[in-house]
Amino acid sequence: MWQLFLIISIIANSFSTVLQKVLLKNNKSDPITYAIVFEFLCAIAIGIYAFFEGFILPKDIITLLPNILLATILYSAGNIFLFKSLKLIDASEFTVLFVTRGIWIIITAVLFLHERFSYMQDAGTALVLLGVILVTIRKHAIQMNRGVWYGLLSAFFFGVAFPNDGYVVTHFTHPVTYSFIIFILPALALMAVYPKKTIAIPNMMNKALLVRIIILSIIYAIFGVTILLAYKYGGDASQIGAISQISTIITVLLSIIFLKETSDLWKKVIGALLGFLGVILIK
């Protein structure tokens, strides 16, 4: 059962990354404003589903508040850097950089969930880093520009967040309830930290853009719910983190087909394959 949920999450994640890049093509677009709207609309989509599925909080919710607060901070920061990175670099390049999320998932799972880490996983980590280096090389020099750093920071925050989610979601009867919480709280946190960006939301919205963001939010909401369901119904955090990197190859291919991101094509493809093979070893 958990494998089916994971497959759905992989496909949804791949398409959402490409759509995010499409939304940020406009040079006037603001990543933080997009992050606020995106998180809020995802929360609405999941909230509607949670209403019918059954919105149930665990009895020990008070003891989980530190973890929920941590998730709020990690996802708020992760989404800001995600949108900032996609605004500056290709979706395919971002995807390869985001593979490093698997490393952080493994490290966090080992330290806090006491999952095992072997020499094979060391080799996998090396392959992931090699893939990242490959896609950042420009004319025999590694260009660690802002887009690259933002992508790596986003991978870090999302990577650390998932094992934390894995711990918390086991206390929830319905994972969708927790999924709603970790979307609505970051949205509210960003609105509180960036009130001017929140006020500016109506000015950046038009009908066509709103429809695209709604579609993106629904697809990403599916990803957010199904990956938690995969953990809830049998997958380990490190195992899910490894297998989910299949989305790297899918996203690179989708970016080539739909976004025509063909510059340094061989580097992106080889980098994606190295990252994918590395994360498979990490599992």
Image (cartoon, rainbow, N blue to C red):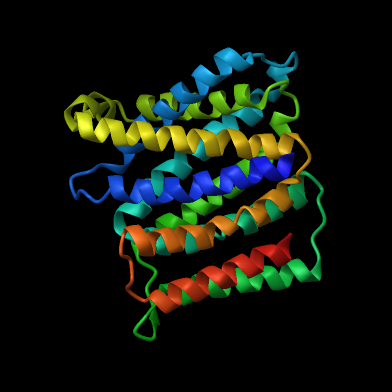
As rendered, which of 281 and 9 lies closer to the eye?
9
**Residue at the location (72% across, 16% down)?**
58
The answer to whether residue 78 is above or below residue 62 is below
Q: Left or right of 125: which side holds 85? A: left
Quarter holding the N terminus?
top right
Q: Left or right of 12: which side holds 108? A: right
Quarter holding the C terminus?
bottom right
- The residue furthest bottom is 140
Percent across and percent down for residue 272 are 52, 68
Hey, which quadrant is residue 41 in on the image? top left
The answer to whether residue 250 is above or below residue 62 is below
Percent across and percent down for residue 36 are 36, 31
Q: Is residue 8 visible?
A: yes
Q: Left or right of 101: which side holds 266? A: left
**Residue at the location (33% across, 51% down)?**
21
Q: How many marks?
A: 0
Q: Left or right of 122: which side holds 274? A: left
Percent across and percent down for residue 27 are 19, 50
As rendered, which of 110 and 22 lies closer to the eye?
22
Percent across and percent down for residue 45 are 46, 24
Q: Is residue 94 visible?
A: no
**Residue at the location (67% across, 56% down)?**
242
**Residue at the location (82% across, 48% down)?**
114
